[in-house]
Amino acid sequence: MITALEKKLYKYIRKTPFYQAFREGKNSPIYTEGLEGLVLSAFTKLSLEKGKQKTWVVLPTEEEAANMMKNLTVLGCDLIRIESTGLKLYSNEVHDANTYKRINTFSEIQDLQKIVVITSLRAFSTPVPSPEFINESKVCIKTGDTFNAADFAKSLTSIGLLRVPATTMPGEFSVRGEVMDIFPFDSEYPIRIYIAWDTIEKIKIIICTVLKKKLQIGHQNAG
């Protein structure tokens, strides 16, 4: 059903003046009025046909952005969404789970060449982390890497993680001898790094369960 409707929508849209105008200047901003729902989603997908760049779609509300995501998913489009942080516009920067979710989103956008980026007007107007901050927030470590726990701890602190005696919640990390626990904002579980002198010996995921109000910690290999 959706395939038949999709074909008719594409045929109709390709004949419209606004689509012809778009094809003549597809690198220029396009402001649409009156398009909504599946028709707007179909036009958005068509805009990717010949272009090699990202297509940004800025919608008035978060609800409309969510609906666009659903429609484009049905139409089989490659897409990503920038969600609002919930902070007041022009407020001070806050390092929390929402901030790092946005950092991951912008990092993905940097790496992708051709994709639809969907966002609301509020999210689009919210200040974003600088490219330098996004790049500095990317951390890739593996077993066998040379590792300096003190320098790594400074890097974690600089991007907003809090050093504590024992890691129990997202946004925290701790160092105990040759073991470092890190609980990333965007992770369900913390990770544990085992250090042998100046080398990473192994990395594990820590599975936490609460039994009788006591934190019981088990281990599971990350790989």
Image (tube, helix red, strand yellow):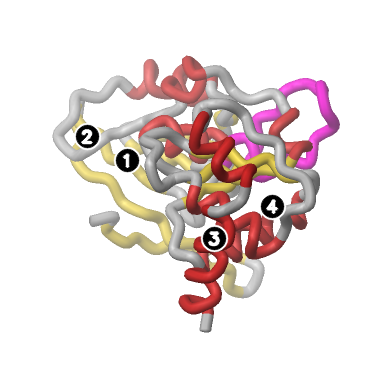
Q: Residue at x 38, y 16 (%)?
A: 151
Q: Which residues are magenta?
A: 83-101
Determine the secondary structure under disc 3.
helix
Badge 3 crowding class, 10 Å Cα cut-off, few under 14, some 14 to 19, many 20 or more, is many
Q: Which mark is residue 193?
A: 1
Q: Nearer the viewer, residue 179 or 162?
A: 162
Task: Tell whether position 26 is magenta.
Answer: no
Task: Using the image, tell me which numbered label, if any, was put on residue 65.
Answer: 4
* Residue at the spot of label 3: 72
Q: Is residue 61 above or below residue 216?
A: above
Q: Amino acid at mark 3?
A: Leu
Q: Residue 202, located in which quarter of the rendered image?
A: top left
* Amino acid at the residue labelled 2: Ile
For label 2, count other residues whose C-alpha is less than 10 Å away and answer few (under 14), some (14-19) or many (20+). Answer: many
Along the viewing direction, whichever of 60 and 182 lies nearer the viewer: 60
Q: Position of residue 64 (x, y in %)?
A: 74, 55
Query: Does the residue at mark 3 contact the one at mark 1 (Cβ under 8 Å)?
Result: no
Q: Is residue 101 something one can see in this rendering? A: yes
Which of the two marks, 4 or 1, is nearer to us in this view?
4
Q: Residue at x 55, y 75 (%)?
A: 5
Determine the secondary structure under disc 4.
helix
Q: Point out residue 187 in the picture as x, y percentages from the top left corner.
A: 49, 50
Sequence-wise, which precedes: disc 2 or disc 3? Answer: 3
Q: Position of residue 69 (x, y in %)?
A: 60, 58
Between the C-alphas of marks 4 and 1, the distance is: 39 Å
User: Do labels 1 and 2 touch, CB within 8 Å?
Assistant: yes
46 to the left or right of 100: left
Mark 3–mark 4 distance (CA, rounded to whole Å): 11 Å
Which residue, given by chain and number where applicable, does mark 2 sit on? 200
